[in-house]
Image: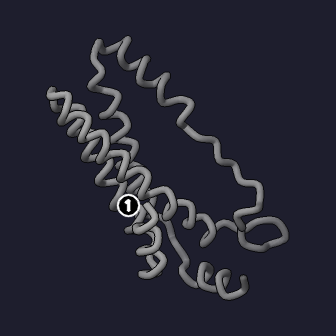
Amino acid sequence: MVWWGRRSDWAAERRYHAALPLLVASAALVSAALVDDPSLKMLAFCIAGFGIFACLPVFWTLPTAFFVGRRGRRWHRGDQFNRQSPGIRRPFAMGWLRDHTGSYRDGPLLLAGLGIIAMGLALGIGHNDALERSASASE
């Protein structure tokens, strides 16, 4: 996580550094859903966790390059920002899917699909590198 965030800073690139870990996490979640061996399933979940946590520090740098806060200035970490986490809803979605399908296989597949959507969004946003560089120069 730390190494990937520093690598993103060194390369001055955010979108691909957010998208690649999401791809790894999604692939690992699909693998976890498809394998039956508990050891391989646990390994796949660990790899998915690595991908998700490697994405986080890079992902949260993306809003600073296109959101504008109060009085026309860019959004900074200290500003109030709506960070409602879907983490509260995931267990309910997993339980709902289990009740309606009779299998735990669909939960990781749902999370993998959401990871692919997030990857597409990370790649599709118009990230302005100049805004990010100007903020770091002024701080």
Q: What's the image's color scheme?
A: one colour
> Does 102 appear above or below 16?
above
What's the residue at 38%, 11% (across, down)? Answer: 99
Instruction: From the top left corner, tell me how far across and down residue 30 is, in percent.
Output: 24, 39
What's the residue at 38%, 61% (across, down)? Answer: 19
- Tag 1, which secondary structure? helix
> Does 95 appear above or below 111?
above
How many marks the image carries: the answer is 1
Q: Position of 70 compared to 35: left or right?
A: right
Instruction: From the top left corner, tell me how far across and down residue 39 is, in percent.
Output: 19, 33
What's the residue at 35%, 49% (across, down)? Answer: 116
In the rendered view of the protein, which quadrant contains the C terminus?
bottom right
Instruction: From the top left corner, tell me how far across and down residue 93 is, in percent.
Output: 45, 25
Q: Position of 21 compared to 41: left or right?
A: right
Mark 1: amino acid: Ala
Farthest residue to the right: give it.
Answer: 71
In the rendered view of the protein, which quadrant contains the N terminus?
bottom left
> Does 79 appear above or below 7?
above
What's the residue at 67%, 81% (across, down)? Answer: 135
Q: Which residue is mark 1?
A: 19
Question: For the residue carrying disc 1, how many other residues have a C-alpha within 10 Å: few (<14), some (14-19), or many (20+)?
Answer: many
Q: Position of 64 compared to 12: left or right?
A: right
Instruction: From the top left corner, tell me how far across and down residue 67 is, in percent.
Output: 66, 66
